[in-house]
Amino acid sequence: MIKLGEKGKDIVSGFVGIATARTEWLNKCIRIQLTSQKLKDGKPIDDWFDEDQIIRINKGVNAPKKEYTGGARHHNPQRKDAIR
């Protein structure tokens, strides 16, 4: 199983890229979006593949750290877990 941020290769087409998205469907089909590090017309190339046909090449890039982005949580500067 490939995780988001890891570099993978589709064994059918040979497409190589970083796993940037994952979808799970009602029929239990899991699809992974691979985004190429190469550009075409100044834009990255990406495509969706079945998870079972992707092999992990290496750990790829680090996924962004989870941050609090706001929402219903009220800001309290005295809380130890408050992010400023």
Image (spheres, helix red, strand yellow):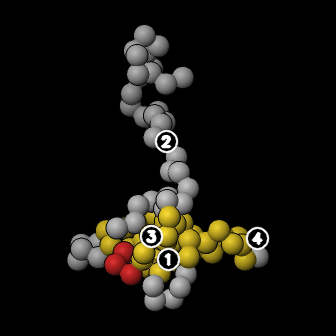
Residue 42 lies, in percent from the top left, at: 76, 70
Q: Which of marks 1 and 2 precedes in the sequence?
A: 1
Q: Are the residues at dot 2 and dot 4 in contact (C-beta closer than 8 Å)?
A: no
The relative height of residue 30 versus residue 53 in the rendered view (above or below) is above
Amino acid at dot 4: Gly
Query: Disc 3 versus disc 1: distance between alpha carbons?
Result: 7 Å
Residue 31 visible in the shown view: yes
Residue of label 3: 56
Sequence-wise first label, 4 or 3? 4
Quarter occupied by the N terminus: bottom left
- Residue type at mark 2? Lys
Label located before the other in sequence (4 or 1): 1
- Identify residue for label 2: 65
> Can you tell which of label 2 and label 4 is closer to the viewer?
2
Residue furthest bottom as drawn: 12
Is the C-beta separation of discs 2 and 1 under 8 Å? no
Q: Earlier in the sequence, mark 3 or mark 2?
A: 3
Task: Using the image, tell me which numbered label, if any, was put on residue 42.
Answer: 4
Mark 3 in CB contact with mark 1 (< 8 angstroms): no
Crowd around label 4: few <14 · some 14–19 · many ≥20 (10 Å): few
In the picture, residue 55 is in which quadrant? Answer: bottom left
Q: Amino acid at mark 1?
A: Lys
Q: Which mark is residue 9?
A: 1
Residue drawn at point x = 47 percent, y = 81 percent: 10
The residue mark sitting in front, 4 or 3, is: 3
Q: Could you tell me which residue is drawn at 23 percent across and 77 percent down?
A: 27
Left/right of residue 38 with respect to residue 61 in the rendered view: right
- Label 1 crowding class (10 Å Cα cut-off): few <14, some 14-19, many 20+? many
N-terminal label among 3 and 1: 1
